Image (cartoon, rainbow, N blue to C red):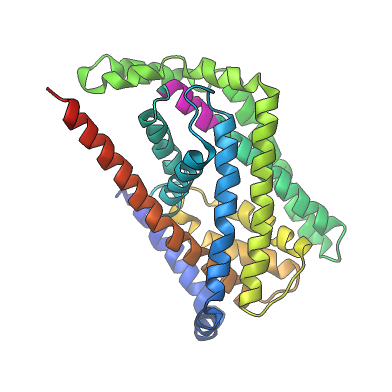
Amino acid sequence: MKLHVALGIVVGLAVATALVVMNDGAAIFRALVGAGWGVLAVIAVHPWQTLFSGLAWRDLMPRQPAPGWLRFAVLRWIREAANGLLPVAQIGGELVGIRLLAMDGFALSDAGAGTAVDLTVETVTQLVFTLLGVGLLVFGPYDPVVTRWVGGATAVALLVIAAFLLAQLKGLFRPLERVLLWLAEKPRWAALGDFAGLQDAVVALYHQPRRLASAGFYHLISWMIGGIEVMVALHVVGVDIGLSQGLLIESIGQATRTVGFAIPGSLGIQEGGYVLACGLVGIAPQSAIELSLLKRIREVVIGIPGLVAWHFLEGRQLARRRAIAP
């Protein structure tokens, strides 16, 4: 494990632990234990998010070969598990996803392009979701200072995303493609030659507005379901809120989590984000941390089987290679 990754984990854990201790850790523990079977209700919401995110990803892949929606839901499940539980920044899951798509018969250039554009569309729809949260702040009885701060941060994010989109259209992946093709000249890395055409495949996808719109629609539904998960999670710890409040909390909380993408699992960042978001609607920090920890529990319960599934697919692929080897 690299030093900066280990340092990020240590700092993130320290921040998360400090937030728990400062907000009556014993009471938080009792609330989580008292949630009982309600935790299963929180866990049951997330697979629907995974399903719709998988459908979005599928819409950005070539029609042939075209695995069904269930296959892409499984691949998305594994992708999320890698991002959430492995000690990597939150793009490691995308690399795992590209590899698994290649194992399913997709060219690496198509797998890489589809995954890169899917990640971009997901980020754009997250911004739309955050703008919804800002709108709820503007028209709600909330602190105008906080509203202006959140709105300003969202405007900066919009500029960053616009610059990233422009960079992709202007050849962002061309240098990466050249490096991969250079590596492909070596026998050990010959398979990387399949990345030829990566930049052209990315640009081609951005010239297909229907597929982009369809993927965006599915991702937006997924973000909305996250607001329902917030409602369910807070309910099981004794705090009842409406859908608009759930959407507001999730939009601000997820935006904050994204800021901490370089820290594995956004440790500490997620907890702080939900404390901020819940505070906007008058929910105590203790309940906000309980919400974040319930999400962590859900992430582990769903994610560990996802990593096992990844290991199974890799093992099956290895067995096939050995079977056809001379």
| Residue 300 position in % (x across, y down) | 43, 62
| Residue 7 position in % (x across, y down) | 37, 56
Q: Residue at x 54, y 80 (%)?
A: 28
Q: Residue at x 33, y 52 (%)?
A: 308
Lateral position of residue 49 relative to residue 79, left or right: right
| Front-lying residue, 272 or 38 | 38
Kindly report the secondary structure that dominates the magenta region of the rendered protein.
Answer: helix
| Front-lying residue, 199 or 259 | 199
Residue 102 is inside the magenta segment: no
Q: Which residues are magenta?
A: 108-116
Q: How many marks?
A: 0
Lateral position of residue 250 relative to residue 293, left or right: right
Q: Residue at x 54, y 23 (%)?
A: 63
Is residue 292 in view?
A: no
Dividing the picture into quadrants, the one containing residue 178 is top left
Depicted 283 relative to depicted 24: above or below:
above
Q: Where the C terminus falls, by quadrant?
A: top left
Dividing the picture into quadrants, the one containing residue 124 is top right
| Front-lying residue, 75 or 15 | 75
Q: Residue at x 30, y 21 (%)?
A: 191
Is residue 230 in view?
A: yes
| Residue 270 position in % (x across, y down) | 55, 60
Lateral position of residue 122 relative to residue 111, left or right: right
| Residue 249 position in % (x across, y down) | 69, 61
